[in-house]
Image: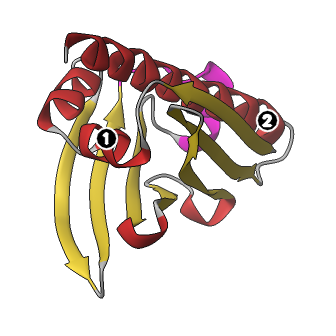
Amino acid sequence: MKLHKTYDLPCGPESFWTLYWSDAIREHLASLGGTETCMSDETQDGVRVTVTRVTSTVPLPKAVVRVTGTSDLRYERTLRYDEARQHLTWHVRSAVVPDKVKAEGEMSVETRGSGCRLTIEGVIAVNIPFIGRGIEKAVVQEIVAGYDNLVEIMGQQLGQT
């Protein structure tokens, strides 16, 4: 299932990325539920690579629990941010049935008028008979809700400055 979403924000790309990586944004997003543990955060050849282990508090549907044997969503997220290109790629590796789940994409920010446009694109594929498509839809909804929260929080932060 493909993911595509755009947002217009009242700031330039540089301000967007500064705010995106800020502690204030990280703390607020963490307060929305689940736990995140940063495994590594380093720069390699001008690209910031951040690996985070995430456990979501969003309950999984009963059918998924039966197939996977777990009631919580756990995954490892790798972000690769190229500052020169104002571009971030993301890859999610499921802790449960990783060989059956593909979740990856990119996030870019470009100047648009007096602000910027954030574009998120990705592919979510779950290869589990009968329930895979339903899981894909739920994951896409969860990702979009996460970006909706991010943009809302950023808007609040930008309004305070």
Amino acid residing under circle 2: Ile
Q: Quadrant of residue 28?
A: top left
Label 1 Cα neighbours within 10 Å, binned few <14 / some 14-19 / many ≥20: few
Callout 1 secondary element:
helix
Give the residue drawn at x 25%, y 45%.
Answer: 18
Q: Quadrant of residue 63?
A: top right
User: Residue 105 colored magenta?
Assistant: no
Give the residue drawn at x 42%, y 46%.
Answer: 13
Instruction: Please name the residue that numbered disc 1 is placed on.
Output: 15
Instruction: Please name the residue that numbered disc 2 is placed on.
Output: 131
Give the residue drawn at x 50%, y 32%.
Answer: 115
Depth check, front residue: 84 or 139: 84
What is the C-alpha distance between the residues marked 1 and 2? 41 Å
- Labels in figure, total: 2
Residue 136 in the image, given as x and y percentages of width and height? 73, 38
User: Residue 60 colored magenta?
Assistant: yes
Which residue lies most toward the right here? 130
Residue 7 in the image, given as x and y percentages of width and height? 60, 28
Q: Quadrant of residue 16?
A: top left
45 left or right, relative to 108: left
Give the residue drawn at x 28%, y 62%.
Answer: 50
Q: Is residue 99 above or below residue 15?
A: below
Residue 22 in the image, given as x and y percentages of width and height? 18, 39
Q: Is residue 11 above or below residue 49?
A: above
Callout 2 secondary element:
loop
In this orientation, does residue 33 appear?
Answer: yes
Task: Between label 1 and label 2, give the one nearer the viewer.
Answer: 1
Which residue lies most toward the bottom here? 45
Which residue lies most toward the front here? 114
Q: Which residues are the magenta region?
A: 57-68
